[in-house]
């Protein structure tokens, strides 16, 4: 017994596959565009400095760079002095603050550290 495939069925299957592929491609494009818009909003928004302050707090916390970014000059200088006096152990403060910054929602971070001007933790 030999099975013969109907050319019409083959064409329908092929057409359905191509349609599904096109739908997946379109959905991937839309998802990529949504991600890109969100990324641009998060990184280009001069009002909310959460990402940059959080990363600098984690990476360069001992130097108080994250404090200077948020406009806390006095606290930034205090952070530098503490780091020097404690031979670097005060860098832990910057690390903890960076983690706290990144775990807060954008709105909560903005209201607490930029509008409310809360300088520590």
Image: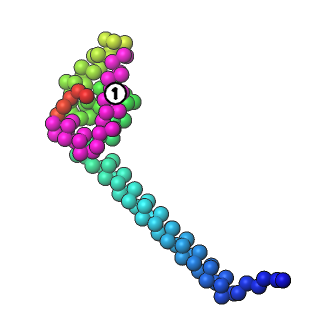
For the C terminus, the image quarter is: top left
What's the magenta region?
A: 88-116
Question: Eyeballing the image, is 121 above or below 42?
Answer: above
Location of residue 117 (image quadrant): top left
Magenta stretch contains residue 20: no
Residue at 23% across, 27% down: 120
Q: Residue 33 placed where, x, y %?
A: 40, 61
Location of residue 72 (image quadrant): top left
Residue at 55% across, 71% down: 21
Residue 107 makes an appearance in the image: yes
Magenta stretch contains residue 113: yes
Q: Residue 66 placed where, x, y %?
A: 29, 31
Residue at 36% across, 52% down: 39
For the N terminus, the image quarter is: bottom right
Residue beneath label 1, please? 96
Near-viewer residue (53 or 92) = 92
| Left or right position of 70 against 95 | left
Magenta stretch, overall SS:
helix
């Amino acid at each position: 017994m030999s099975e013969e495939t109907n050319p019409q069925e083959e064409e329908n299957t092929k057409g359905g596959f191509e349609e599904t592929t096109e739908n997946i491609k379109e959905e991937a494009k839309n998802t990529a565009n949504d991600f890109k818009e969100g990324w641009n909003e998060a990184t280009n928004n001069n009002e909310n400095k959460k990402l940059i302050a959080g990363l600098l707090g984690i990476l360069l916390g001992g130097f108080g760079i994250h404090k200077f970014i948020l406009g806390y000059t006095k606290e930034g200088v205090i952070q530098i002095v503490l780091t020097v006096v404690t031979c670097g152990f005060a860098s832990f403060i910057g690390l903890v603050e960076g983690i706290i910054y990144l775990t807060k929602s954008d709105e909560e971070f903005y209201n607490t550290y930029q509008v409310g001007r809360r300088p520590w933790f």
